[in-house]
Image (tube, coloured by chain):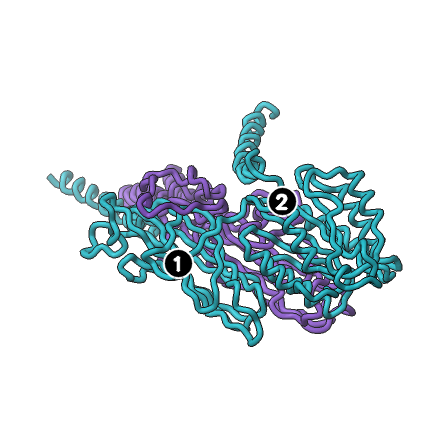
Amino acid sequence: MIIRHGPKIGFLVGILAVLATLSAPPASAGDSSDQEAPKVELVLDSSGSMRATDIDGRSRMSVAQESFGAVVDALPEETQLGIRVLGSRVSASSSQALGCRDTQQISPVGPVDKVRAKAAIARLRPTGWTPIGLALRGAAADLGTGETTRRIVLITDGEDTCGVPGPCDVARELAARGTHLVVDTLGLTLDDKVRRQLTCIADATGGTYTAVQHQAELTSRLNQLVHRAHDTYRRTPRQVGGSDRCANAPILTPGVYTDRERFAEHRWYRVAVSPGQELRASVSVALDRSLNPDYGVLLRAVSSSGQEMVRGTDAGSGRTDVLSTGLRWSDQQPSASPEPSASSATDGSGTGLVCLVVSNSFSIPAGVRTTPGMPLELTVGVVPSSPTPGGPSLGRGWLLLLVLAGAGLLGGLVTGWLARWRIAIWKDN
Amino acid sequence: MRGILLAGLPFTVLSLALAAPAAADETPSPSPSSTVSTAGTSFLTATGVEPGQPVRVAGSTGDYLYWSFDAAAGETDRLAFTITLPPSGSRHGPATWTVDVFDGLRRRQACVAGSQTATAATRDAAVKLHCLLRQVRSWADPWSDEPLPGTYYVRLSATGLPEQDLGLAIRTDLAITAHKGDPQPDNANLKAPLSPAVDPGTTVAPQAAAPSSGPSSDPSSDPSSEAGPLERASSWFSWPSSRWWWTIGGGVLAAAMGVAGYSLTRHPRRWFSGR
């Protein structure tokens, strides 16, 4: 029996090995050495209100300090973590001009010295004002620019007490700058104004908002966010500027791109597609501000001569983060069509440029800013096209079996009767 | 005796043919036991899940949670969500939860059965969502949005809720099950699965626009493709198409019936006297 199991076990091991190699590429893509380490900065509010003792009977500050310690302990090896505080030096009784510049980095973004970082956190005492906008700007500068997504985790218990710059405007401005920056926010109170401000910051950058009511919640959420930076660590899309018409649109190769699109704007891009190739494109427009409830997005593939070839569209209503659509297109009959539709811009090799145009039907309530445009993510792929299949040449189904069996039976009966008839004739003769 | 044997042959073939489709409907999907405890927050960062793998993620109300899974041609996938809501004392009104499914090109995919959207009353402790997707086809016109082999994205979001309820803690359980079947159409396949590009692209100068890769280029060498899924849902019955088995079985059956018919006319006593 054991000997007979041998091949089976070998087969199973083989399957496991195949599965392992199948699942390996995405992991190894993140391990390649030429890529940056994931970068996260924690921004902690150290304003006077953090003294309030309303989380599990302890002060907000001590809860945050303990959670920070736990996060630093559980930090993934590769992740580079920085810590910035606001309102930690200038007391709340001092002037606003002074208090609203009070933000400092207590641990630089880089490989973390856990002991030093924890000591720096433990020394913090809640004192001053709440310049959130300025702290976000500082955090973005600390993280610098580069290939990977930057994440800021903002922990605060109060709204910005400085007003200028407005934190939500700062968040939108940072998101529009090109480096892929995500701000996750954690509110230590259930106050309405704080929640609105923090959800605005999170929505503007594609981040999340969490209302924290218990110590355990804060620790697990912080850990989740820091690990998310590590797990979802990908290269950021390339920034591209679509043009207002096809003729001068940028030519894209397969990959992911990011752009901004204003309301009622058309953004054009071009992709080179040869006969026998299939163009695949998808687009996502992020709803990063408050919009009117019904909206739509349209992606069209247009030939150089202005003929629409295929479109992808989606519409929706209500609360959502992005609206996406996609399309496939291939030159199905490269030679049969009397008038080359997509290949009118051929340069001898048969390669045509296909224009992609993105438009939207978003609208905004009065008072919401229209600039910068909404974030747009475009993916482009060019793959071999799949030919139209021919009809089936074989049969299937119970009816087929019945017909064949009936035909066989009939054939046998006829043959048998023929044989009997021949034997009878032979006997007569 | 020979007649009985001959008469039995068609039934053997029939029962074989009967048993095989039943076997093809089983779900021999891999069931890795490790629970997925993360979710992405966008298409690009969606967490990959294998069908059969349990998912349990802690999140906040208002988060947009993304997962992705690979589906092969012939598969029919079913999603089941259970969202454990925050305590009803901290909620201010009913909340509507929605599951959206997108294919590799981020095109919306229809749920043919199940409650894709559900509204939880303030007193409800949990809300359940279901989505049965269409069977994945092996080929489709570029102009259609039929489900094709490749990556599928799942997004869970709260699409309607009181603004005060944002940010409260929730727990999400997701189960994806895949049922394999015969891919349609039979003798067609998609040259490259709908696996989206994930790496940044580059723009090129207009004069250098000619793509270097022709139709014969290897899609796997494309730097911007995620690992593709299996080509087709593979069951032994579907080599290379189940039509082969039906036709071969039909031929054998016809031959057996031919012999039976012949012997019926030649030796009718063997059939009707019982000896």
Q: Residue at x 71, y 43 (%)?
A: A108
Residue A394 visible in rendering: no
The chain drawn in cyan is A
**Quadrant of the drawing holding the C terminus of chain A:** top left
Q: Residue at x 47, y 49 (%)?
A: A256
User: In this figure, which residue is indicated by the disc labeled 1?
Assistant: A243
- On the image, the x and y values in percent for residue A258 come to 49, 53
Outermost residue on the right side: it is: A57
- On the image, the x and y values in percent for residue B182 come to 43, 49
The amino acid marked with disc number 1 is Ser
- The chain under label 1 reads A
Outermost residue on the bottom side: it is: A366
Label 1, label 2: how far apart the Cα atoms are: 35 Å
Secondary structure beneath label 1: loop
User: A120 or B138, which is in the foreground?
Assistant: A120
Secondary structure beneath label 2: helix
User: B266 or B46, which is in the foreground?
Assistant: B46
Q: Which mark is residue A80?
A: none
- On the image, the x and y values in percent for residue A288 come to 57, 63
User: In this figure, which residue is indicated by the disc labeled 2?
Assistant: A231
The amino acid marked with disc number 2 is Asp
